Image: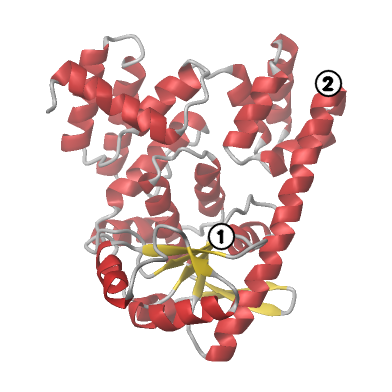
Amino acid sequence: MNLPSELSLVFLLSRFHMDGRARIKARSFMEKGIDWVTFTRYMRVHRLTGPVYSNLARHFPARVPRQQLMAIKAMDQNHIKRGLNNAGQVIRLSSAFRDKGIPILFCKGVSLSIRLYQNPLTRHSGDIDLLVSTKNVQVAEALLFSLGYRRVASLKHMDAGQFRQYMRLRFHAQYRAKGLPLVELHWRFCNNRQMFPVRFADLWRQRQIVYLGRTEIPIPGDTHNLAFLFIHGTKHGWERFFWLKDIADYIALAKPGELKNWLAQAREHRIGHFAMEGFFLLERFYGSRLHPDMDNTSGWQVRLAAKIVSCTWSWNDRLSGILALFLHKVLFFNRFHYLSFIRSQVRSRSMLTGTEAHSEFYERFKKFIKWK
């Protein structure tokens, strides 16, 4: 697949360890000509500022216009400031929940950065994701209230009964406090109770501990952490490519046989198709080869999907829609709306958000295969 040079260069520079071959390839993109404004937009949209700036400053400082390099450096400094703010709040929340005796797990963000890179500031950090058992949601919320957090506007007028009903239908609630990062309080990994129906007690028993300074930060075990990343990426249509990078870097840490065991558990917990989406995208955009632990059937599905999707660039929209529907129904890729994101944002170099691309894709479906 021919990606814009700017996006391909962002992917190359997002690697934390660029070998000689990667540096040569990056240099060839620069020699052919890079629109650095477009490059910077891709980098920012996909939340890859940290590793990209690090590699530019280390390997290619003379090849980037000084004004643009200074702009990227400023973005990286803002990323570090936000990460420090989030890290301080993670320490505060972890200590508060521990003191109250409320079991809680931290997902993504600062805690994932520590797990993958032994550094809380390496990975982009936006909000703070907390996971608690359903029975502890009310006490966890009360503790957040005592720390100055309040429900977001769409939830703040709910009474206790309405919020209990909301919990039956949804998987998390959001809380804001002035000057502090958004907190998402999860009691499930996704809305559908049948997908990854793992009890919190099992998650807690298999938890692992990372350290932020002297503070213990409990996080899910690697199997559950990776499951959450696949579910989260699929749920949001993979609109941020740093989610794929998380998975690629996690898989790189896997010991022989670990990924095979995880894939077996993923299929058992009804999220095997989420993993297939992730592997499909890793192969198409990062050039990652399918992991040898993937069984022949799964590998066949991903390779067939990749070949068919590659053909849709030159075929008409009606046929593209039918093929995507085929993949959706027959190969169990339950969320294929990221195809339109590839069309609109990557292929035509526009900067549509994932949500806009999602809407555009289904508008095409309705038009060409007459969905009502």
Displayed quadrant of residue 67: top right
Q: What amino acid is at disc 1?
A: Leu
Residue for point 32% across, 75% down = 199
Specify the label residue 65 is tagged with: 2
Quick check: 370 left or right of 323?
A: left
In the rendering, at what x and y percent does residue 229 appear?
45, 54
Displayed quadrant of residue 327: top left
Question: Which residue corresponds to mark 1?
Answer: 182
Classify mark 2: helix, strand or loop: loop
In the rendering, at what x and y percent does residue 143 appear?
52, 81
Residue for point 34% across, 82% down = 135
Q: Look at the picture and state if 103 lies above or below 41.
A: below
Specify the label residue 46 is tagged with: none
Quick check: 153 left or right of 21?
A: left
Nearer to us in this view, 87 or 29: 87
Residue for point 27% across, 36% down = 301
Q: What amino acid is at disc 2?
A: Pro
Residue 87 in sight here: yes
Q: Residues within 10 Å of mark 2 (few under 14, many from 20)?
A: few
Q: Nearer the viewer, mark 1 or mark 2?
A: 1
Quarter of the figure with the C terminus: top left
The earlier-in-sequence mark between 1 and 2 is 2
